[in-house]
């Protein structure tokens, strides 16, 4: 009967067997993966819960132009919808509240053939407003990306 010794495998061209003692790594890797997945799910829940909050959007247009065209965003059924009002004299203001707010809104104001100056301003909740100004005939001031 032959007894196998530690160096016998190596002598036949195979690397020596490594005997592991102690802890295995795979349970720790599995635990880390589960914790990362749970943290990701929690982050998604927090983001989605934050979207259900009511957001106040305030649009304002000032200037000396007459008969301006105004286009602005509203939010319905998870989509950004553009509303239009034209022709109007200034100043103009609209405030709305939505629970479906998504970034990517727009307020665009175009002067008429008579020209003039227009300034648009958009404030979301009480943050710093987005503003833009345009002057001339059929010039457009655009506030976007809020």
Image (cartoon, rainbow, N blue to C red):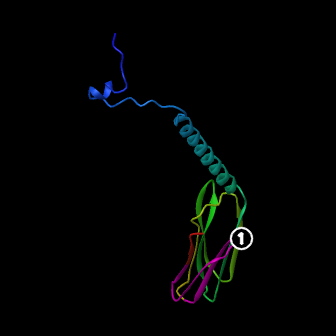
Residue found at the far top of this picture: 1
Q: Provide residue 44's location: percent of width, then percent of height.
A: 62, 50
Q: Secondary structure at mark 1?
A: strand
**Residue 139: within the magenta?**
yes
Residue 109: which quarter of the image? Answer: bottom right
Q: Provide residue 62's location: percent of width, then percent of height.
A: 65, 84
**Residue 136: within the magenta?**
yes
Tell me the quadrant of the picture where the C terminus can be found: bottom right
Q: Nearer the viewer, residue 42 or 87?
A: 42
Q: Nearer the viewer, residue 2 or 122?
A: 2
The residue lying at 59 percent from left, 67 percent from top is 105
- Number of numbered discs: 1
- Residue 25 falls left or right of residue 47: left
**In the image, is residue 105 above or below residue 77?**
below
Q: Bounds of the magenta span?
A: 115-141
Q: Provide residue 24's location: percent of width, then percent of height.
A: 53, 34
**In the image, is residue 40 above or below residue 71?**
above
The residue lying at 34 percent from left, 27 percent from top is 7
The residue lying at 65 percent from left, 60 percent from top is 101
Q: Residues within 10 Å of mark 1 (few under 14, many from 20)?
A: few
Residue 88: which quarter of the image? Answer: bottom right
**In the image, is residue 82 above or below residue 132?**
above
Tell me the quadrant of the picture where the N terminus can be found: top left
Q: Nearer the viewer, residue 46 or 79?
A: 46
Residue 17: which quarter of the image? Answer: top left
Query: What residue is disc 1 on?
Result: 95
Q: Nearer the viewer, residue 132 or 64?
A: 132
């Amino acid at each position: 009967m032959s007894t196998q010794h530690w160096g016998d495998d190596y002598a036949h061209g195979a690397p020596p067997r490594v005997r592991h003692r102690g802890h295995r790594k795979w349970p720790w890797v599995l635990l880390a993966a589960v914790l990362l997945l749970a943290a990701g799910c929690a982050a998604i829940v927090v983001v989605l819960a934050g979207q259900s909050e009511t957001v106040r959007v305030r649009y304002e247009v000032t200037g000396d132009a007459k008969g301006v065209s105004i286009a602005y965003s509203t939010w319905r059924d998870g989509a950004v919808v553009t509303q239009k009002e034209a022709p109007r004299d200034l100043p103009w203001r609209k405030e709305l509240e939505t629970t479906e707010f998504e970034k990517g809104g727009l307020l665009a104001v175009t002067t008429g053939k008579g020209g003039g100056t227009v300034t648009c301003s958009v404030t979301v909740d009480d943050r710093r407003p987005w503003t833009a100004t345009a002057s001339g005939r059929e010039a457009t001031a655009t506030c976007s990306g809020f």
